[in-house]
Image (cartoon, coloured by chain):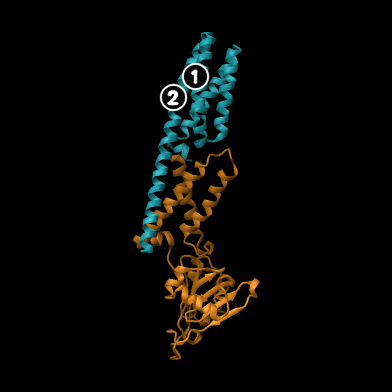
Amino acid sequence: MIHSNKRIGALFSCIAAVLLLAALFIFPNRLAWAFCNDVTALVDDAIADVKREDFAAAEAAMRSIDERFHGVSDTMKLFFDHEDVDELSASIAAATRLVEQRDGAQVMVEFENIRNVVTYLAEIETMGFYNLF
Amino acid sequence: MFVLFIRAIILYTLVFFVIRMTGKRQLCDLQPFDLVMTLLIADLASQPASNTGIPLVYGIVPILALFLLQQLIAFLSLKSEGVRHVVCGKPVVLISRGIVDEASLRSVRYTLSDLMEQLRSKDVFEPSSVEYAILETNGDLSVLLKGPSQPVTYQALSLPSPAAAPPYILMQDGVVHYPSLRQSGRDEAWLTKQLANAGLAKGAVFFALLRSDGVLHVQSKDSDGERAYYIEQKGQAK
């Protein structure tokens, strides 16, 4: 009876571990890619706006990026290195300020940094040979 | 997260094979797959525990990966002898009929000093008195002494052996252990009566053990003199 209970316990703990892992394989990956796609599109819009010197539209795009980021930043800290999330937060804040100051040259650097960080966060959730090693 | 999972599996496999290759000297009463788990899990847990910048899931996912892998290996080892040989290795005979097998010794990277040390830990000082010494898969050495060196047993002397069973812990720190009491076939009224016969209140008992020979061994708490009582049962079936 005791052995049977232990076997059932071991089986249930394995099932629980598999389910938890399955959730962890799916949810952070989807979160990261959805966020990456949204932010990349918004950054592209902002870049186009800055190139046209339409800083008002770029400010609106930055506000959208900021809102999108703050909607998921806490959840992201559950699954990603806090340093990367903080770096993204700092880049978004810097880009917003540079757009407000109409500094078109410098803001491009921050846009690129935002794009790099969100792509990095999504890609580390992607199964690939180079990620493994 | 899936990348973390696979990375943990790769590292587990690597460490496992390194430990298997280093031989049984590295093991300490654990099977290789248990030892790998023990080695890796502490480090995996300490990383997110000590660094608040790292999410806990970075520790959770690899630990769960190791857990599942260990369960899988344990299951497969149970079901298949072939897997068991690969995972745990095979026992190696180091001494056969008093002769030390040099090739076996070399194959498990044991020096004669290691063997002698292991034998001494088994109270054996002469390899010549050993019939067989087998290095088990968990790194432990099992020793079978030659007939004349074996300890005398009750059976050899045709003597009746005492009943051997672990004692029941009936009380601890003044608290009755009812499951043990039930297993021993006694009840609380019996215990109270025995204690009363010894002039002890339940609250004064540090522990009460019912030995296999039916003797109730009671020790009072230090506040009550820390005295030992051996209460024998009259007409007790042994």
How many numbered badges does the structure rendering display?
2
Chain-order first, disc 2 or disc 1: 2
Is label 2 in a helix, a strand or a loop?
A: helix
Which amino acid is tagged 2?
Asn
Identify which residue, B110 or B83, lies in the foreground. Answer: B83
* Chain (cyan): A
Q: Amino acid at mark 1?
A: Ser
Q: Is residue B82 above or below residue B164?
A: above
Of all chains, the one bearing label 2 is: A
- Which residue position holds label 1? A64
Is residue B18 among what the camera can see?
no
Chain in orange (letter)? B
> Front-most of A81 and B202?
B202
Q: Residues within 10 Å of mark 1 (few under 14, many from 20)?
A: some
Which residue position holds label 2? A37
Please say if A66 is above or below A11.
above
Q: Residue at x 41, y 51 (%)?
A: A13
| Quadrant in which the N terminus of chain B is drawn | top left
Q: Chain of mark 1?
A: A
Residue B191 position (above or below residue A32)? below
Please name the residue shown 52% across and 62% down the image: B27
Most distant residue in the bottom direction? B158
Which one is in front, B84 or B67? B67
* Rendered image: mark on residue B132: none
